[in-house]
Image: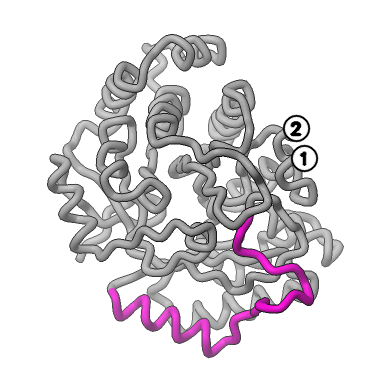
Amino acid sequence: MPDRAISRLRVDEARALWEGEDVFSLGKKAHAARLALHPEPVVTYIVDRNINYTNICACGCRFCAFFKAPGQPGGYVLGPQELATKVAETVELGGYQILLQGGMHPDLHLDFYTGMLSSLRDGFPGVAVHGFSPPEIVFLAKMEGLSIAEVLAELKASGLASLPGGGAEILSDPIRSHVSPNKCPADQWIEVMATAHGLGLRSTATMVIGLGETIEHRLEHLSRLRDLQDKTGGFTAFIPWTFQPGNTALAVPEASSWEYLRMLALSRLFLDNIPNIQASWVTQGPMVGQMALYFGANDFGSTMIEENVVAAAGVRFSMEEDDLRRLVVKAGFEPVRRNMDYSRREG
């Protein structure tokens, strides 16, 4: 939580920093804030696998290169054995968490999800399931005629451990209506996270920059997250990354690494109540990922044993755990395995 002896950064102050500071001065301020929160020379990471249980999605977001519309060739749903094989491979590679996300599939009902979770819990009790973004929860609740709380309670009872922050993109409805008009509005994304936190489910928060938004839209996004964190304390980390336009229907130039580092730094300064900031080497590459550790980030994300969504846009960065640890050491820090809640993991 923030030190109240230090005044909280207001929106107008954040805007002034964005307009008046260059990438290096912003980075210096953000690194100081990071060291105030985490003075030990440690960078955390997790060993997990991103498993997409389906690529069939009725949402049709303009920025997504991964989805297939219902009935379109190339759509799939992983069967129980395929899913179990992927998780078993993850365990063999030292993984202990899976990031489980899919699309808004009109033919998959709640019993599919609870059955999938129960099967994973029974077959792999040592593997935590970090799964289902808020838009998936909203879609499922509407399809089943249930409340968001009822759906989340069923999923938690079946083995869901925590929620990823996917589907946030930019939490400003003018942007959402342009790039993902069929996805839940910003207020509903916040509602899902507030409800999850109330049920004892921790979550992460994300932001995708480069969708055509302005700094005002980004600050609205950050303000929404900070306000909710003040109420619930349920976010463990914030992860910003850049939109990858390859193979998508959204014709915008890709945000630069310079833009990414500036936004990362501003996020660290603004989100005084979210303890951890994650570097996005998956979109930026390992070298910029290293630089991010001096622009406010204290976490190096995941080894990402499997990743499909960013790869569908033509960006394929991958890393073995030994390579990840080596990069962290070369940046001047000690690499430490963690769990989703940022408790240290031995081994």
Residue 26 vs 94, above or below: the answer is: above
The amino acid type found where label 1 is placed reads: Ser
- Identify the residue at the far bottom of this view: 81
Q: Residue at x 45, y 29 (%)?
A: 263
Q: Is residue 71 magenta?
A: yes
The kind of secondary structure element at disc 1 is helix
Is residue 1 among the parts visible in the rendering?
no
The amino acid type found where label 2 is placed reads: Pro
Question: Toward the viewer: 198 or 20?
Answer: 20
Callouts 1 and 2 close, C-beta under 8 Å:
yes
Q: Is residue 183 left or right of residue 213?
A: right
Q: Picture coordinates of residue 177 (x, y %)?
A: 77, 40
The kind of secondary structure element at disc 2 is helix
Q: CA distance from mark 1 to mark 2?
A: 5 Å
Magenta span of residues: 64-93
Q: Circle 1 is placed at which residue position?
A: 177
Q: Residues within 10 Å of mark 1 (few under 14, many from 20)?
A: some
Q: Residue at x 47, y 40 (%)?
A: 240
Q: Is residue 273 magenta?
A: no
Q: What is the number of the mark on residue 39? A: none
Question: Toward the viewer: 25 or 193?
Answer: 25
Q: Residue at x 44, y 13 (%)?
A: 17
Residue 105 vs 80, above or below: the answer is: above
Q: What is the number of the mark on residue 174? A: 2
Q: Quadrant location of the N terminus?
A: top left
